[in-house]
Amino acid sequence: MLLPGTLVEVPFGRRQALGLVISQAAGSAFSELKTIAKVICRELLDQHQLALLEWCWRYYQHPAGEVLAAAVPKLLRAAQPYQPKPELEYYLTSAGRQLEAAVFARAPVQFMLWRALQSEVLTPAQLRALSAGWSATCRRMQEKGWVTTRRAQRAAPDVNDQNIQSVQLSTEQQAVTEQVCRHFSHYHCCLLYGVTGSGKTEVYIDLINRQLAEGRQSLLLAPEIGLVPQLVQRIQQQLGTPVGTYHSGMSDAQRAQVWQGARSGDCKIVVGTRSAVFLPFDNPGLIIVDEEHDPAYKQFEGFHYSARDVAIKRAQMLDIPVILGSATPSLESIANAGQQRYSLAQLASRHAQVELPDWSLIDCRATPSSLRQGVSGSSYGLLHNDVKQAVQAQLTSGRQVLVFQNRRGYAPLLQCPACGWQADCHRCSAHMTWHRKKQHLQCHHCENIQPRPQQCPSCASPVLEHFGSGTEQLEQALAEIFSPVPVYRVDSDSMRARGSMQQLREEVLSGQPCILVGTQMLTKGHHFPRIGLVVVVDVDQALFSADYRATERLAQQLVQVAGRAGREGSKGHILLQTRQPEHPLLQLLISTDYWQVAGQLLKLREQAGFPPFSAQAVIRADANKATLAEQFLLQAKAAANRLGLPGDVFGPVPALLEKRAGRYRYQLWWQAEHRQILQQMLPQWVETIQKLPSRSSVRWHIDVDPVAL
């Protein structure tokens, strides 16, 4: 008898297909049933995992097969049983050690690897960090008898007893850990609100250490891959314990190994991103969701789940505690704490008595409209004169500066001043961004790339002007103004290479004066102790957005980026450049703390009847013609009316970005007073929509608890 959770191969038409046993039945209404062809893996998923995934496909109204595919590593759901290959490490043979450097005169990559292998044995990951083509190079060196391999020796993390730094908690931190520890034996959700720099990570590590002492495993979720290495490093330094990692940047084999290590209990601690929430554990004890407010926990393609919400449900099913940590908690979590669904623990002061930074608004309306141009054509007017003086003062005193601009590229718009032509994406309803370094135009929605025209395509004018600024333009302008101080750009363009973020951290942590300029990648949990000043170049973008969540995200973003300043040493300063200095949100931010700002935003949400004071689901549809998507959603709305869905159904309306990658996008919103009502009626509505004749002319999906328009 096959138990639920068994991976099998079954005949499906003329081919063989993979299937997962999810339940058993005593009989069937079908007279002819086919026999399972092959058992691939018994109990691929345990009873708890199956129950969790079933909850996911029912709650999010997503096909069960796609939910299972998203939760299980590719190699473990293949037709052939997974057999892990032995891990190898590379070292020089005696012949390789006797070589002279002159042998590699025409082989610089071989020389680099040969020199690195002289001092130590290296793993494939270490070799990959040295050269992307390491594998072929090492193969040639093996053929010549210079390099050989052996089975990798399992080793402890790169720390020793002398380097281990035990966790030293403040009185406030100790009170928080004791509050959480009282619930170690059962399910409990705790919202940990700690101001930036208050030492939330130390609290996490202490709680993980207590779980280790009881032989239990811990899962720590982070919103971005870039945050995983520093969390792993801190845990290993303070606990001296190996830590597994799980994220999309790893190979299929690496993810399969961590999956199996967590399931067997060999891996006691795992730090991972969104998908790690589905890992199996032999003896789970604690789940921590760091930066719980971050939208990155929501999957926007395919299976639209929230890793934070799944983590809470999983902790409830396992009867273990879950911690939601943030300096800027989501309004949903704050509301749940207010209604005592979650307990609230607070770290109100920074660690080691470091003061919180001061905030100031810089009124850019007083800046002359004529901008002085730099040597290379960059605009010095990107920064107010007061800001430039403040940056120079910080650099002179030996401190570092962070300049925040949440827009990559050189300029968001290229335009002809003669006829008004604009560089628009022909596949999206958006402008193309000019990337000056690569001399091309790029759409940041569909990634369409075009060469920059030498003249206006409409009127042949040789003059094309750029408007607005991105991180690339800021980098250039800052390098000219504050030369020879190094300027580091941090965005998805500059940080593509493997290990680039880690290399940047090492350079910045050296403590030398420098300027960091970047997007939201810089706002999330990075610890740069020498930053004394944070400058936000353009605050106004989100103040008048059509998305009702925009003000919440702006407040979170500003508080998070401000938290990078003054973490050690002298008090930090935050300068916000704006043309709306009287805006109530900005005034509230500089005069109070995030918790008070969130309270005001919650009152506005309650007045409008928006979440967390209601529940939402949205049907999104896209087609190659706008009328097709709109007509499909009109039929879906008519079906909702026939079913008598309680609450309000809005739309269909175009998405904020109506056209993307050549397809027109529309959406239909259903807002109900209570989540229970929505979950009760949603399956009926989805079943009706699946029978609509027009569904074949569109691509559509449902998004439960949407976080974006």
Image (cartoon, grey):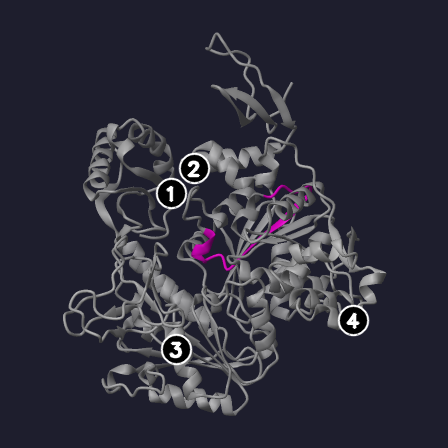
Q: Is residue 286 magenta?
A: yes
* The quadrant where residue 558 appears: bottom left
Q: Is residue 48 left or right of residue 13?
A: right
What residue is disc 1 on? 704
Q: Quadrant of residue 26?
A: top right
- Which residue is under mark 3? 474
User: Which residue is more in the foreground, 206 or 599?
Assistant: 206
Please tell me whether mark 3 sits on a helix, a strand or a loop.
helix
Q: Which residue is mark 2?
A: 59
Query: Which tag, 4 or 2, sits closer to the chain's start?
Result: 2
Mark 3, other Cα within 10 Å: few <14 / some 14–19 / many ≥20:
many
Q: Which residues are magenta?
A: 279-297
Q: Is residue 289 above or below residue 266?
A: below
Where does residue 353 sit, x and y in percent of width and height?
58, 79
- Does label 3 or label 4 sit earlier along the sequence? 4
Instruction: Choose the circle earlier in sequence order: 3 or 1.
Output: 3
Q: Nearer the viewer, residue 499 or 243?
A: 499
- Asked if residue 170 can be seen in this view, the reply is yes
Q: CA distance from mark 4 to mark 1?
A: 64 Å
